[in-house]
Structures are given as C-alpha cells and as structure tokens.
Image (cartoon, helix red, strand yellow):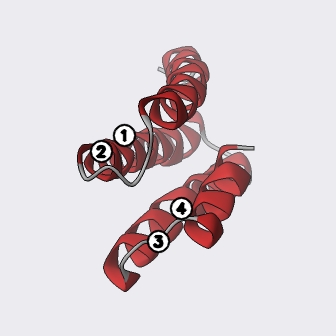
Amino acid sequence: MFHQNAKELISNKKLTSYEKDQLSRASFSIVLNIAEGSGRFSAKDRRNFFVITRSSVFECVAILDILEDNNILSKEEFDSLENQADEFSRMLYAMIKNLS
C-alpha cells in the first residue's frame, strides 16, 4: 500500500527526476526486501532484510519531509503518508524483535 501511494505521488506531483528516482527506489526497496527476507531460511537472514526494509521506510519519510518543506506536499498529505510509514515501521520493528 505504501509503495502504491508513493507511486501515485510520483505520478501526480511535480517532482524533479532526482526526487522521483529517490522516492521510487526507496519505496520499491521496501517491497523487494520484504519479499527477499521472507524467502530466507534463517531468522538472522530474515531479520537483516527486515532491518534494511525499515531503513528504507525511514528514507521515504525523509524524502517526504523534504517535499513538504519545499511545498510540494501539503501538511495533510505528508501527515497521511507519515502515519502509514509509522504504522509500517512499527510492524517491521515487531517482526525484527521476534527474530532476535
């Protein structure tokens, strides 16, 4: 869901090619690292991919924060996406803790 919302933002907002690329890569990384981590057999390997995934979530929030600072995103748009990211981050944290 978060990746889909990021894709819509990329399509609907006037972003530089750099901003589009960074947000696209970071949000896509979330999906890919969850998939790759889920395919790992050891808890240590799965945990590592989920940690990377959580870092990508933080990267997306940093990008969104910059977009809000530059008045590309409204406060409401930012808050909505940040809330989604926060919820996702909390789920990942729980998954990481369970694998520790």
Mark 1 lies on residue: 58
Between 53 and 99, the one nearer to me in the picture: 53
Give neighbour class at mark 3: few <14, some 14-19, many 20+ (Cα, 10 Å): few
**Which is more N-terminal, label 2 or label 4?**
4
Mark 2 lies on residue: 62
Q: Between tags 3 and 1, which lies in front?
A: 3
Mark 3 lies on residue: 14
User: Which quadrant, please, contains the N terminus?
Assistant: top right
**Which residue is most to the bottom?**
17
Give neighbour class at mark 4: few <14, some 14-19, many 20+ (Cα, 10 Å): some
Mark 4 lies on residue: 29
Asked whether the beta carbons under mark 1 and mark 2 sit within 8 Å of each other, the answer is yes
Element on which disc 1 rests: helix
Give neighbour class at mark 1: few <14, some 14-19, many 20+ (Cα, 10 Å): some
Q: Residue 70 at x, y = what percent?
A: 25, 53
Residue found at x 59% / y 20%: 87
In the rendered view, tell whether residue 4 sits above or below residue 98. below
Q: Which amino acid does label 2 sit on?
A: Ala
Element on which disc 3 rests: loop
Residue found at x 43% / y 47%: 73
Element on which disc 2 rests: helix
Q: Which amino acid does label 4 sit on?
A: Ser
